[in-house]
Image: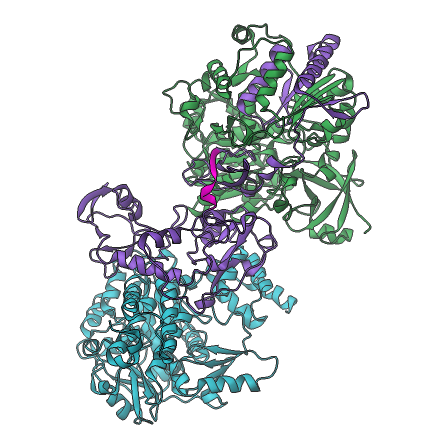
Amino acid sequence: MDVLRLTSLLAELPTPRTSLLDNLGRIRREVGPITAELSDALADHMNIRHGEVHEVKSFYSFLEVPVDALRVCTGPVCDCFGARALLARTQEHAPPDATVLEVPCLGHCELAPVATRGDTILPFGRDEPVLHRANEGPSLGLGQADGTLADYERRGGLELLRSLPSPERILAELKASGLAGYGGAGFPTGLKWEAIAAEPEPRYVIVNADEGEPGTIKDRYVMELRPHLLLEGTLLAMRFARATEGFVYLREEYATARDRLARAIGEFRAAGLLDGLSLELVVGAGAYICGEETAMLESMEGRRGMPRLKPPYPSRFGYLGRPTLINNVETLAHIPAILRAGGERWPRGRLWSVTGAVREPGCFEAPLDVTPRRLIEEYAGGASDEIGAIVPGGAASGILPPAALDVPLTREALREWGAGPGSAGLQVFPRRYPPLRLLGETMRFFAEESCQKCTPCRIGNRALHHICAELEHGEAAMPRPQVEEWLDAMAATSICGLGQGAPIPVRNAFRLWPELFAPLGSA
Amino acid sequence: MVKFSLDGKTVSAPEGELLVYAAARHGVFIPTLCHDEKLDPYGGCRMCVVDVEGSPRPLPACATRVTAGLAVSTNSSVPQYRKTLTEMLLSEHLNANPGGRPNELLDMAEELGAAAPLILPDAKREPYEDRNRLMGYDPDACILCNRCVRYTQEVMQCSALSLEGRGPTARIVPTHGHSWLDTECELCGGCLSTCPTGAIYEKFHEGAPPQHERSLDQVKSTCTFCGVGCQIDLHVDPATKRIVKVTSDPGYVSNEGNLCVKGRFAFNFVHHPDRLTQPLVRGEDGELHPTSWDDALRVAAEGLRGVKERHGPQAIGVLASARLTMEENFLLQKLARTALETHSIHSCEAT
Amino acid sequence: MGRGATTNSIPEIENCKFMLVIGSNTTEAHPVLALRMKKAVRKGATLVVADPRKIWLTKLAKRHLQLRPGSDVWLLNAIMHVILEEGLQDEDYIREYTEDLDAVREVVARYTPEQAEQVTGVPAADIVATAREYAGERKAAIFYTLGITEHACAIDNIWSLSNLVLMTGHLGYESTGLNALRGQNNVQGLNDAGANPTYFPGYQTIDEENRRKFSEAWGVPIPERPGYRLDQMMSGLHDGRVRALYLVGENPAHTEPNAHHVEEGLGKLEFVVAQDLFLNETSRAHANVVFPASSFAEKDGTFTNTERRVNRVRKAVPCPGEAREDWRIVVDLARALGARWPEYRTSEDVWNEFADLSPNWSGIRYDRIEEVGLQWPCTDREHPGSPYLYADRPARASGRGKFYPVEYKPPIEQPDSEFPFVLSTGRTLYHYNSATMTMREPGVLDKQEDPFVEINPEDAVALGIREGDWVRLVSRRGDLEARAAIGERVFPGLVWMALHFAQAKVNWLTHDVGDPLIGTPEYKVCAVRLEPVAP
């Protein structure tokens, strides 16, 4: 450890508790992985007890590992496309002093199996450039990247921010557009904005850019290709909410997005667009659960990213206990188009991440009622293998057989299949990849990402992973009726969406692949 | 006071009271594991969830506050959840009795007839060894209710315990997994007192039989170590008539069940072999020799009387002690002012 | 103001909005009471700590007034200066309930914050801010303990605090007041019970009327001649005024300042009776008779805590061997001395005699304190006890609180070229007094076994001392060795030691010049030099 570097860095680090995560990140980048000694030194500097910094730094996956660690993704798509072999290969060939890490999902599923070395993305485990495959959709126009603020303005950018419609009009258009949160929960955006406007000031605005849902890459595409578009949406939200402080909470793994956003924020600032406002980039440190909005708030406040009990909701009791408007990246990015076109005429659509067994995986803007088959064939170059299963949204959206390829990916249509569109991360799995393994890997993911606060999520997911693993050997770890009871308890009594949603793919699989679960007996 | 409905009956409670207490006052006992009235509501174990009209999911009674018109039901699906959650906790509860302390999880399992349907393959946690001699901790008895951690953060504010990590390898340990002695811990044992499963225990009771604590006699008294006057329960082993443990109850007024290292752990002086057990009188040889009470009292009285006769009562001083009871100090000053005929009574502890 | 007790209750602390903790290392000396302060801070209270050391509470404090030892009067006068200068005093309270403010006004006018900064080392701006916060908040409480009283100017310090409290009218409400935290379990009760040369039980003055009262109650004449205070007894050892001592649970050879001198005096005594749990330095060397006594767990009775609450003590285990309950020993000795006392069958009989004779306690009876102790004053069986004092007005006969102007007097012993360091002393969490109880608890010793001296890193470097090294401390009266504990808790030029260690008694170093009125010794400031000890 470089003691001198630490001493001079510490002197620069702010001491409010809200700076803890950022301070830890800076020490990690500039001094080294957070050891017990570094943790205590920072704690003393910030006048926080040693134990509290310890439990915060240990919560995240990356604070205790070097910045140049090799991270190999073993998320479901990568697992299907040879992540374990890549991991073994990486471990074998890595220099002796290198750290090799298995991580759940790096958010680059279109490059599966993917790895990273520090901030460098290694598509397919190789040193090669990262290419985007996106379409020029009517709302987001991802087909063309904006290099600079000038590029953005040339395409009609900033128009809305400059004209700034009245709050009443904004609310009316949002409601008319039917826009619902694209992070996965699907809460109507108009209602959310209406709620925040009814709360007392000061208020905060937070952009949820902690995209971590396996198979979901859309927010990264927005941030890497059209960062200014996101910022315009964010500033519209801040103006609407009369919030002077805004934050973008970005997952650590999105290094390119981090650069693009930081540069774009700089350009906005230089152009005077942030006068009187503060817009801060908060970088996470590797924890899926921080995408849950209240966990994110805890993380930003310098504590373990463990979800709060709801109610109260963030619109009432958010960041530092103040009313807070939290929106997903893509959701905000649609808002300029909605205001430009008018809510009624806005071409309703969303971004679909299409990955797995397709020829041209990428991120595509398409109508809300698009079918998996259309996404695969018309947008993603067609299937590259015989399709065995599809996952329509994120990890908790359900696992569907090929028979579902022609179902519109709407909430209503998918409900009949016991599934949902979630974060619109369509993952296509070939027949050779056993659904039971997919289910088991999904449960393992949930178990490893569980924050440990509530019993049903903490233990239920581990048990389900174990049950799937035993089933692969034809063994029953628990009788089916009891499994159903456990699923009920998880869905009903978990604190947040992670534990509440985990039973969905299990129940879905029970229904669509009953033969896999025969050893458990009948329900 | 507001009215709300509890299992179909209209009852009242102060607005904002935690549901778990309001229900208890109306005869509905809602079990909890992660709740401690000294700590902020946490709602982690989910054992106390109840159905609340209008809420899409059941809510934890330990963290939900009474409002007018709240409609609460504790009997539909709730009992089954409770049993399932107990089964879950049991499925990684590898050691239910590291130190003879009560185990509320086992009590609940017995009451609900719940048993572990499986033992999770990753139930075994990294063992924790510590050279301190006061507090033992077995991670395999821990249910991660986080009460101990929250006690250190919210009550003691030393934060000596951490909920470390995420996922299946998460555990509760003193800071960085170091010995308690090397953290900001002040050895007050508050974490131990709030642990519902006895995972943290008095180390000197390691290996004690299950329910050992419940077999001890309890005598309520007042701590002797400072002016706060913490109310304590001395636990006496009925067989040996020795104090083997000290606890305190959250209902005790001045200290709310909290203690410090001395109050909780420094009781062994009572039974120390150095204790004086016989009166001593200094002999001609200049040494102190054991003698009878009658003899010692006679020698003392003669000695004091002699000084009084030779030099007057003013030549005798009495030093009383803050360690004595009110009654003893009262008698001592009475002794000085009557039998010794002097007001010269004071002590080394003016404050 | 009239009474030597905390004005408010422990449970009220958590509702304070402003707390000034001065000369009290509360987390170590009163750890469980400190939990209420921590709770108050969590609930949003402002905490200001005035202490020469960076004690633990400074971590929670909005502000640490790190004053030089013994400069409390300067600091407090400067705070009052600001209050009067800015008109922040409570005029109504002053008019209705106090007298002689002008005398104080005149004095503090000369104590400007700027000059205070020079003397105390506390920035003037911090003094001003503290004055404003304290005066501006109704639920503002002050807590102090030995850091205020163990000085030659103890009474000055207490008067200063009293002036501050009266000036702002911060008295007679919940969660306000002036709270002297009692150091030991029954030090409050010890005084309440009359173990004091200047008053009878229940703070009843020794005058003609009360002498008659107690004489009638006890059936013997009560002496007229005033008794000696502790410091007078200690000096009496040397000049022959005192020839015999009856020591109950006391160890003056350890606990008194200038201990070598005390030791010498004890050697001159003709007769010593000691009564204790263990042999100690005093009894081993000087006692003619030693009575084996009882621990708190071996007897019934009551302790009165710092909030004036009378709590029950209950017998849990038998006394070892032939050891006896202390109260029985006193009764036995009285009988041996020929006294005709009534028969005391239980400690309750003794209590009832005390309560019958002491009006402020007469409502407290064992049957009422079975579950929860009562706080005096409690004047009859219907009285609910008194969580806080002076709800009506100060307790002096005039009903008015008196302002006493106080001028700063520097500590008696100042550092010089020969003894360049200021030594201050105090308690630590892990031990109790002379540690006869805690030194017998191995689990506690794991945390703190050897005597230690806190030294600022700057001084340690200059002296070539490293963490854990043995260091010799020398004063004009003696010397001792302790391990260096190097850190920022003390500022350069200040060293600090705990008073508990038998093998390194700080009282070999301290001087015995005490406050002229109450005799409390100046444990808190003396001059020493430090010498590295060759390994």
Q: Nearer the viewer, residue C295 or B40?
A: C295
Q: Nearer the viewer, residue A333 or C241?
A: C241
x and y, in percent, of residue A66 in the image = 55, 74
Q: Quadrant of the N terminus of chain A?
A: bottom right
x and y, in percent, of residue B331 in the image = 57, 17
Q: Is residue C462 left or right of residue B221?
A: right
x and y, in percent, of residue B209 in the image = 49, 49
Residue C332 seen in render: yes
User: Does B318 appear above or below B56?
Assistant: above
The image quadrant that residue A265 belongs to is bottom left
**First to last magenta residue range:** B212-220
Q: Residue at x 62, y 7 (%)?
A: C224
Which of the colour schemes (rainbow, by chain, secondary structure, one colour) is used?
by chain
Q: Is A85 inside the magenta-drawn segment?
A: no
Shade representing chain C: green
Q: Is residue C409 left or right of residue A321?
A: right
User: Does A311 appear above or below B347?
Assistant: below
User: Does C173 appear above or below B130?
Assistant: above
User: Does A401 appear above or below C444?
Assistant: below
Q: Quadrant of the C terminus of chain A?
A: bottom left
Q: Is residue A213 left or right of residue C448?
A: left
Q: Is B215 inside the magenta-drawn segment?
A: yes
Shade representing chain A: cyan
Shade representing chain B: purple
x and y, in percent, of residue C82 in the image = 52, 37
Q: Residue at x 57, y 71 (%)?
A: A30
Residue A15 seen in render: no
Q: Is residue C83 left or right of residue A77?
A: right
In this view, the residue farthest toward the front is: B239
